[in-house]
Image (cartoon, grey):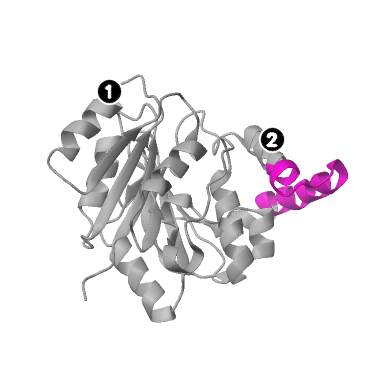
Amino acid sequence: MGKPLVSIITPSFNSEKFIVESIQSVQNQTYKNWEMIIVDDCSTDKTVSIVEEIKKKDSRIHLFKLIKNSGTGIARSTALAQANGKFIAFLDADDLWKPEKLDKQLNFMKVNKLPFTFSFYDCINERGNSLNKRIEAPLHLSYQQLFFCNYIGNLTGIYEANYFGKIAVSSIRKRQDWIQWLTVLKKIKTAQPVPESLAYYRIRENSISASKIELVKHNFAVYRTHHRLNLISATLCMIGFLFTQLILKPRYSKTIKASI
């Protein structure tokens, strides 16, 4: 029996500076049975023309274009609808995978009989230079832990579609990845990461991840809209979030030597 197909979900928006590297990091995988589904969210730069040229030479790459700018959630949802793989993976248009990412992660899932897993990842800047930082996670991540902090790097998550079905992606513009992994953990209770770094997360200037104030605002919105908590409950949850973010999560940030 051949290796199962992996569908890679990639939203893009004005990613001309980075998308070639991201695609190449997928093409360089030692695991070859994949499809990369790129959904462009009305880019105004050369993103679409770049992808169109690349996909002429690689039939595993598919491009779809939204008719109006709708946000990352809609782009991911559109890509998911086109996915045919037994496994669903995620890679944004500015992030990178290490060459053995799929091989190691799928083998980890097989050996440990897991329908979902993720991994550690390293941080790079806009120019692709190492920030000498690795983000790790609890080795047995519970739903409660995830509820107060998203320990899962979206670029590392893989789930088995036969087990979960295609997990709907929220249409909200920010933090829809956190909502998705909460849906996963609600079903399986705990998750195990591959205990090594398998990807590079690019920290962009003025990104949501870099802005702590914006992060707080969007997390509060998740508690209010997705979890449907009243104002008092959502505020109490934000206290738990801030404690986790400021006190607990930094313990999983490790200083490393440059490796890219």
Foreground residue among 125 and 111: 111
Q: Where in the figure is residue 227, as x and y percent of width and height?
A: 73, 49
Dominant SS in magenta: helix
| Left or right: 85 as drawn, with respect to 118 | left
Provide the residue designation for mark 1: 46
Res. 114 in view:
yes
The quadrant of the picture occupied by the N terminus is: bottom left
Q: Which residues are magenta?
A: 222-246
- What's the amino acid at mark 2? Lys
| Left or right: 124 as drawn, with respect to 141 | left
Q: Which mark is residue 145?
A: none
Res. 251 in view:
no
Provide the residue designation for mark 2: 217
Q: Quadrant of residue 52?
A: top left
At x 17% / y 46%, what residue is drawn?
59
Quick one: SS at disc 2?
helix
